[in-house]
Image: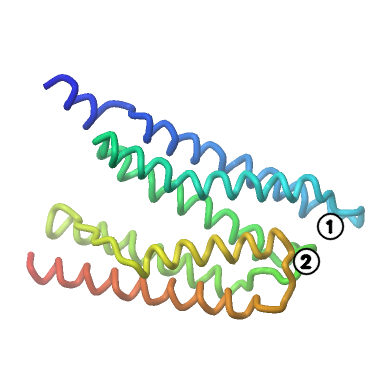
Amino acid sequence: MTEKREHRYGLTLANRITIARILCVPVFILLLMYYVVGAADGSEPNWVIRWAAMVVFLGTALSDALDGYLARTRNEVTRLGTLLDPLADKALLLSAIIVLGRPSATVFEPNIPIWFFLLVVSRDVVLILGALIIHHMAGDVVVRPRVTGKLATVSQMLLIVWVLAKLGTSGFAWVLGAASFFTAVSGILYVADGIRQLEKA
């Protein structure tokens, strides 16, 4: 009985990895800002800092699968983990999109357009407000995992890696288009799920 209680409420290995992912976000932002600001001064961009930022980003992004795998295989799915895991993803992706979408980030070519940043932020704001409304009116919020949501996250990560690695403009429009499409569609489907929950309530 005690062991099961610890699995539900204790600080599990998966939760520790998720917290480490959240702590890596400010490190990533710091490296990225050093690179952008240094290049804006007219000096030669420091490629070591740029690649360090990409390594931190990739490590943080890929460890998302690790903490999820550990939580499931070790029977350690906790309420804390279900709250922190999407928070880690959102913090990493939004911070990268904000910095790389700044007009001053001309050192990256191509860079992330501002309209894409607005699309991502608008979707997340709508989903957060919707969750608060459902919680207030219907109680528990049931989030149904969708393939489009996963594809939106993966395509956004691919877009960020493309910009960080400076892979050029060839093919960038396709990556940007895919990220935009899945972001918009996943947002619409989550809103539809929320409306159905309100109707049932």
| Residue 137 x, y percent position in the rendering | 14, 60
Horizontal side, residue 3 vs residue 150: left or right: left
The disc placed on residue 78 is none
Whether residue 13 is situated above or below residue 169 in the rendered picture: above
Amino acid identity at mark 1: Ala
Tell whether label 2 touches label 1 (CB within 8 Å): yes
* Mark 2 element type: loop
Q: Of helix, strand and loop, which one carries label 1?
A: helix
The quadrant of the picture occupied by the C terminus is bottom left
Question: Can you say which quadrant of the picture contains the N terminus?
Answer: top left
Which mark is on residue 40? 1
Q: Residue furthest top?
A: 2
Q: Earlier in the sequence, mark 1 or mark 2?
A: 1
Q: Measured along the vertical axis of the image, is residue 26 above or below residue 174?
A: above
Q: Position of residue 25 (x, y in %)?
A: 56, 43
Q: Position of residue 166 (x, y in %)?
A: 74, 64
Q: Position of residue 171 (x, y in %)?
A: 65, 78
**Residue 29 versus residue 143 in the image, above or below:** above
Q: Quadrant of residue 165?
A: bottom right
Q: Badge 1 local density, few (<14 within 10 Å), some, or many (20+)?
A: some
State the CA–CA distance, disc 1 to disc 2.
8 Å
The structure residue drawn at horizontal position 33% and vertical position 64%, both measured from the top left corner, is 127
Which amino acid, mark 2? Thr
Say the numbered circle drawn on residue 106.
2
* Coloring applied to the structure: rainbow
User: Farthest residue toward the left?
Assistant: 200
